[in-house]
Image: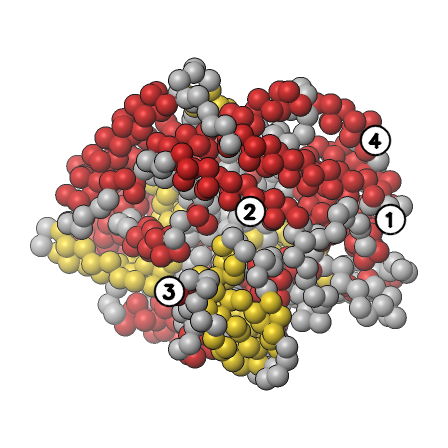
Amino acid sequence: MTFRFRPLLALLFAVGVSASAFAQSAADLGATTPRKYSQLPLQPTNDEADAALISAHLLTRFHYDAQPLDDAMSEKIYSMYFKLLDGEKVFFTQQDMANFSSKYKDKFDDAIWNKDLSGPFDIFNQYILRVIDRMNYARGLLKQGFDFTTNDTYTIDRKKADWPKDKTELDKLWRERTMNDWLRLKLAGKTDDDIRKTLDKRYSNYIDRMKQLDSQDAFQTFMTAYTNCTDPHTDYMGPRAAENFDISMKLSLEGIGAVLQQRDDYTVIRELVPGSPAIKSGKLHVGDYVLGVGQGDAGSIQDVVGWRIDDVVNLIRGKKDTTVRLEIVPGDQGTDGKHEMVSLVRKKVTIEEQSAKKKVIQITEGGVTRKIGVIELPMFYSDFGARSEGDKDFKSATRDVAKLLGELKAEGVQGVVVDLRNNGGGSLYEANELTGLFIDKGPTVQVRKANGQVEVQGDDDPGMAWSGPLAVLVNRGTASASEIFSAAIQDYGRGVIIGTPTFGKGTVQTLIDLNRFASDSDTKSDYGALKMTIQEFFRINGGSTQLRGVTPDIQYPNNDDDKDYGESTYDNALPWTQIAPADYKPVADMKAYLPQLEQLHDARVAKSPAWQLMLDELNQYKKLADRTTISLNYDQREAERKQLDAVQAEFRTRHKAIDGNTTDIDDESQLDDGLNPSERSLKSEIQEQEEAKNAPDPELQETAHVLFDAVGLIDANPKLAMEVLPYGGKQGDTASVASTNAAVSLPTPMAEPGASSSPAQQQPAPASSSGGK
């Protein structure tokens, strides 16, 4: 292969920690027919060696913090590779690690530069064999059972533990792990025979999954180790992952609109997307088994029993207006039921589950009733491809939020909460545009390139889609593009930031299609994509969200997840820095009423049964999460279970009193049943998720109440209104409505700074904005 640079079509991302609900693997329909089991040992392909080399050239030359691929980097990759493969240190021994170290620790750089990936693949193959060996060892232990009268313990968190010294120590560890699996089921009331059957099937299924791993899996893992060593948010995406990332950003795909799930050897329909061909047909239902897939009106049916879920998805997806046929068995008949054939025409399917949504919370207090609008935004999505093609219905977070704001205004809301909890980021362009819906115009973010050049990006369109009281609800899962938006709202004094400190990601990635570097004659290769950090973003006040995140104006209690989750938990995260502030002026001053809002908040939650219950549940969660070892003594574990059951029973009683829920709840269902998710019935799994989705949300309710207070303070004090409303309250409804209408038809994305660079400069050239982790 001739390696060369050429201008690229790439997007900039500020993606933090989100993942698409449709993150299932796929490839071209013309791909090789999948096999139930891959042939071991796995071997690297020429395409994979080329992709590694291309990635290395890019990372060592154009990464924001470019580092040489040398022996020192090799040792970092080596360490990360084993962290990905055996992070709990339960498969390899110290003897294994000594052998690996002598052969490969400082050789991974040579493996990439010389296009010889036999070393990383040797480790991966041995990993597969070791996992299968451990599963078979565990299956053997099931035959004899266990003695639960001893004082043995099991370490449930081994991240900081050493690898077992030798096979004897490894066997002891796996005996304890298997004992714990057995004990969990025993405590849930299962008989010994049922336990043996359940665990033997679990371990056997795990062996099957390991045997289905292929070259792409091995290469993906190794390249993830390399890219993550450059910084936590640079990633390699193989062909499967690259397609799914694209789907997650544009919230659409071409297919039938059925979410699939693997259960044992079978592919089961987990969900049907509203408006999709699957649901419109009336012939597919949640729980149905997919046994075969055929292409076109007369193509042969390929038996997919025992296949990987991504291979099944690969066959079902395809170009719109083409036909796919599914051989199914209705879920209520079981796998031995009557086979049925369903023919469907593929269409463009929009994934509305991840789209912006709205609702209205009505609060009455002191004889006063106010409506507070809520907009939930799971991620900053944008379909740049559909937009560039002139599709008037292209998906955009800003377009959707602008439309929802117009609807909320029509419903007469007096304040708006933008809920960004667990929004891991997305398009940097969308974060910038969304901020523009809440300010007249001005800078929203500063972006610094590796050469130190800083560009200020902002909103140039006058008017606001919403000029009234605003709150932004955040938590530790609020990351990247979400932090850009939250920080800009805070710096402008435009609204109140409420919740817990955010993730702390302050870097920008570009997505590079590695196929752009293939020779003109090479049209069959698929090298995947590289998501590479190339910039750092800063608040308009000159500060950075890197490591520190955004600190809310009103803070809620957290669950201590900052110890294990967030930018500060990465060893190689970039340091916090700051630059000069942008030329901007705050549009309001929140300091004028924050003390009053905090006082009202503190007084209210001190008397709120729902808030106090939330605090007690958080404390219980922290207590369980802090455990590092558990007993393998039946009597002790049973006593702990009864104690936990009493605590949970009290919580349920308090929930019923607060929520007015009189539905009988099976107490046993609230305790650990010892099962993995796929071992429970699909119906109960879906019901549990629906109950969690519809459960009361004390944080959101309290945030709406804080905004209720803000509206009251503003209405009662015209002088205060002049300080806390944007631009002294001078932006009226006319400007807001005009801005809303304008936002529904956004201009063409502006080019990212330095987007156009000639081939002679040998730089990857982003063509439009966006942001990513």
The residue sitting at 31% across, 29% down in the picture is 641
Q: Name the residue under label 1.
A: 115
Which of pointers 4 and 3 lies earlier in the amino acid sequence? 4
Q: Which of marks 4 and 3 is in front?
A: 3
User: Compared with residue 233, is residue 275 higher up or lower down, i.e. above or below?
Assistant: below
**Within-10-Å neighbours for mark 2: few <14, some 14–19, many 20+:** some
**Residue assigned mark 2:** 205
Q: Which of marks 1 and 2 is nearer the N terminus?
A: 1
Which of marks 3 and 1 precedes in the sequence? Answer: 1
Which-is-in-front pick, marks 2 and 4?
A: 2
- Find numbered disc 1 in the image and state the secondary structure of the residue it sits on: loop
Please report the residue visible at 36 percent of the width from the left and 60 percent of the height from the top. Answer: 375
Q: Position of residue 538 (x, y in %)?
A: 57, 47
Q: Nearer the viewer, mark 1 or mark 4?
A: 4
Q: Is mark 3 on a helix, strand or loop?
A: helix
Amino acid carrying label 4: it is Lys
Q: Decide: marks 1, 4 in contact (CB < 8 A)?
A: no
> Are the two marked residues, 1 and 2, in contact with CB atoms closer than 8 angstroms?
no
Q: Residues within 10 Å of mark 4 (few under 14, many from 20)?
A: few
Distance between the Cα atoms at labels 1 and 4? 17 Å
Label 3: which residue? Answer: 332
User: Residue 67, percent across and down?
Assistant: 77, 40
Residue designated by label 4: 103
Up the image or down, 635 lies above or below 268; here it is: above
Measure the C-alpha gap from mark 1 to mark 3: 52 Å
Q: In this view, does 532 lie above or below 553?
A: below
